[in-house]
Amino acid sequence: MPIESRFRNARPRCLTAALLGCTALVAAFQPQAVHAQDNRSVVLDTVVIESNRTDDDAGSIVATRTMAGSRMATDVLDTPASVSVITSKEIRQRGAETVEQVLRYTAGVTTDFYGGDDRFDYYKLRGFDASVYRDWLPMQKAFGGIREDAFAYERVEVVKGGNSTVGGPSEPGGAVNYATKLPRTQRFGEAYVTAGSFDHREVGVDFGDNLTRDGTLSWRLTGRVQRADKELDYSKNDASLLMGGLTWRPSDRTSLSVVLDYMKRDGSTGSGFPPGTNFSRDRFFGEPDFNYLENERTSLSVLFDHDFGNGLKFGANARYSDEDRGFGYVYIWDADGLNPTDRYYFANASSAE
């Protein structure tokens, strides 16, 4: 046999012997390596994942679970209803301060259909005035009720059509539900300051933490103060919100939350000239001493949830509210900007408990 052929046959045998030797070497040192890893092991802290009843509304604009349509936390894709959810992150990113601004891009919803008249929240679902809920407890309808502060809510849920009756009596178009901000099981916080047109100044905070190391008792404090004028002379747009909450979780299946909140709006409404005239946009045709919009409400909410297991859950919510609201202004009707026209005094005041 040629010498070159013998060397070519010997190469595979040499490589096989070398691999077997390395395998034996690794096997000989394996116990020592495992022992060294055991000595360097580190026990990590427990990671608690909180569902917040539905989703991570503060961290995502896409909600995958909702209580709308079934009154239980259910996947949106499994909910047999037309549901839209606007999370707190989307509200913050869009800078929405009123419910009309929150619902502005929701399918089937019409907002701002009275223009500069901002006495109430104006929106309709599929052409009907919407029924309004907070934590699925009924509230006054948007037209005639207190204007809500979007900063107080974790999310806004919209259920369209007849399935909205899951929350109780509802208009054919559907219902809107505001989900109150509740304490979380981990420390968090945010603060902001804004300034803008018409002498707008605003500051807000939202933070919370655990009172116990095991996370069974948590707290949250939310507040906002706004001082601003409006486009018209002699007008203002002031608002205040203060809300505090406690949540007790005696077990991973039970939670009890108590939330106390105070909201006040001190502003003004119309008294501008109708469109189509040559007057400046800030020209005021009302009475400076009779131009106000006042909303004030104090609420105490209690929310209880318990999971018995095997798909059986129980929830009970209660709320007490004391509110006062009213407005007064002078407005012009049917004016063309050329001929004399009348002015009308218009006012309303009401309270509820």
Image: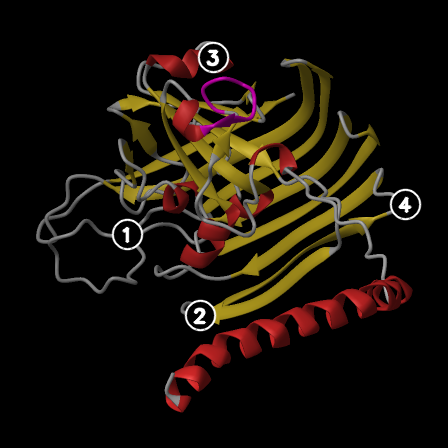
How many neighbours does mark 2 have within 10 angstroms: few (below 14), some (14-19), or many (20 or more)? few
The x, y position of residue 311, in whole percent, is 63, 14
Q: Residue at x 50, y 15 (%)?
A: 167
User: Which of disc 4 and disc 1 is earlier in sequence?
Assistant: 4
- Residue 92 highlighted magenta (yes or no): no
User: As displayed, is residue 107 above or below residue 241?
Assistant: above
Quadrant of residue 190 in the image? bottom right
Q: Which residue is mark 1?
A: 272
State the separation of the CA atoms marked 2 and 4.
41 Å
> In this view of the protein, which residue sits in the foreground, 235 or 96?
96
**Magenta range:** 68-75
**Which quarter of the image is occupied by the C terminus?**
top right
Q: Is residue 170 visible?
A: no
Considering every residue shown, the one lying at the far front of the view is: 1
Residue pointed to by mark 2: 196
Label pair 1/4, CB-CB below 8 angstroms: no
Q: Position of residue 110 (x, y in %)?
A: 27, 35
Viewed as shown, does residue 331 lie left or right of 91? left
Q: Residue at x 58, y 68 (%)?
A: 193
The residue labelled by disc 4 is 212
Residue 267 drawn above or below residue 203? above
SS under mark 3: helix
The three-letter code of the residue at mark 1 reads Gly
- Asked whether the viewer can see residue 348, the reply is yes
Label 4 residue SS: loop
Which numbered marker is on residue 137? none
Assign a secondary structure to mark 2. strand
Q: Amino acid at mark 3?
A: Val
Counting from the top left corner in percent of width and height, residue 51 is at: 63, 37
Residue 180's quadrant in the figure?
top right
Q: Please give the residue where the numbered disc 3 appears in the rendered image.
A: 166
